[in-house]
Image (cartoon, helix red, strand yellow):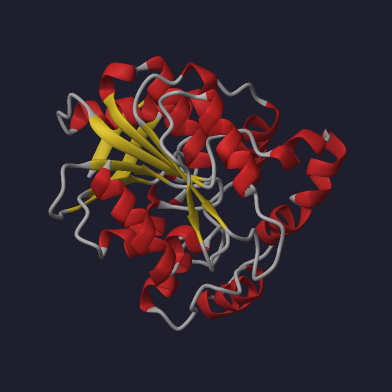
């Protein structure tokens, strides 16, 4: 379906399942297809392509706050007075902003390896950020076939099964028919900067919140985005935060893009 938002229409897909609806918000370079593995667990998911991505790629980019306002429009369009909201990576920060500013619309919050301050972000500067995302910016200067794009991501996401049809569907959704990436460079830069240098209001959360975090960041034995100790410290500071859930044997992307990660995430969503 298409949902009117500032500047145009947002593409939204609904996966029918056996639960109350869950609004699922993808990460900075993802799309609504990120949630296909979770949807396979009989979870009713409302999955938007955020502005600048997928079938919403022609919408001008915004900010975490703009994405949150877009999500409010999605809830309105589906006539959902409130919903459980989940966000993965950058989607977690969008979900937090939505829950803090519109707490009556968010009955529960599930954050997946994002949404809470990442310790590594505190060590980044504008210069190091530019260097870190330089490969992603360069990728926007060329065209890709789906197979070429899959081959690159097999290296970047070693735990994701590139022979899985859901994986191919996910990465194919990133490309225009002529092989260009559908996420404009300016949108990628703006959203990444907002996640890293913006001010999160997570300490103002008042809705029941769950936090899932991966054992690794990119591949086995890589340092995680959040350690178990850091996750426990967040729970000690935030009264509405349930006991954090460590997803063993997966990395950042694998929290939702692997069978093991999606099973744990779906279980927590059903509980929430």
Residue 85 picture location, percent across and down: 33, 36
As drawn, is 127 to the left or to the right of 62? right
Residue depicted at 68% across the width and 61% down the height: 139
- Residue 157: name its quadrant: bottom right
Residue 233 drawn at (x, y percent): 60, 33
Residue 2: x and y in percent read 26, 40
Q: Residue at x 52, y 53 (%)?
A: 182
Q: Picture quarter containing residue 170?
A: bottom left
Which quadrant does the C terminus fall into?
top left
Name the residue: 54% across, 42% down: 114
**Outermost residue to the right:** 127
Q: Image quadrant for the N terminus?
A: top left
In terms of depth relative to the viewer, which is nearer, 226 or 98? Answer: 226
Above or below residue 59? Residue 36 is below
Question: Visible in this render: residue 214?
Answer: yes
Q: From where the camera sits, is residue 6 visible?
A: no
Q: Is residue 83 left or right of residue 232?
A: left
> 34 and 254: which one is in front?
254
Residue drawn where x is 37% and y is 72% of the image: 166
Measured along the vertical axis of the image, is residue 169 above or below residue 31? below
What is the residue that sits farthest to the bottom in this orientation? 163
Total tally of numbered discs in the picture: 0
x, y percent for residue 260 = 41, 69
Residue 162 left/right relative to 263: right
| Near-viewer residue (245 or 83) | 245
Q: Is residue 126 above or below residue 53?
A: above
Q: Is residue 168 above or below residue 138?
A: below
């Amino acid at each position: 379906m298409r949902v009117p938002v500032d500047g145009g229409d947002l593409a939204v897909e609904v996966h029918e399942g056996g639960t109350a609806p869950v609004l699922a918000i993808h990460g900075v370079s993802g799309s609504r297809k990120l949630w296909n593995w979770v949807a396979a667990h009989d979870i009713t998911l409302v999955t938007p392509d955020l502005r600048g991505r997928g079938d919403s790629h022609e919408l001008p980019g915004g900010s975490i706050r703009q994405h949150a306002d877009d999500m409010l429009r999605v809830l309105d369009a589906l006539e959902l007075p409130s919903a459980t909201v989940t966000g993965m990576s950058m989607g977690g920060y969008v979900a937090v902003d939505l829950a803090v500013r519109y707490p009556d619309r968010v009955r529960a919050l599930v954050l997946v390896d994002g949404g809470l301050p990442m310790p590594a972000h505190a060590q980044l500067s504008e210069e190091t950020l530019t260097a870190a995302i330089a490969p992603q910016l360069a990728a926007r200067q060329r065209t890709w076939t789906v197979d070429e794009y899959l081959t690159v991501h097999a290296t970047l996401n070693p735990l994701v099964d590139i022979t899985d049809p859901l994986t191919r569907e996910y990465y194919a959704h990133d490309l225009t028919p002529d092989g260009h990436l559908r996420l404009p460079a300016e949108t990628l830069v703006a959203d990444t900067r907002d996640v890293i240098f913006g001010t999160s209001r997570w300490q103002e959360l008042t809705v029941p919140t769950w936090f899932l975090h991966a054992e690794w960041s990119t591949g086995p034995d890589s340092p995680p985005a959040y350690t178990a100790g850091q996750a426990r410290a967040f729970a000690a500071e935030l009264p509405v935060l349930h006991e954090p859930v460590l997803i063993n044997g997966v990395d950042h992307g694998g929290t939702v893009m692997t069978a093991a990660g999606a099973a744990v995430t779906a279980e927590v969503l059903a509980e929430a």
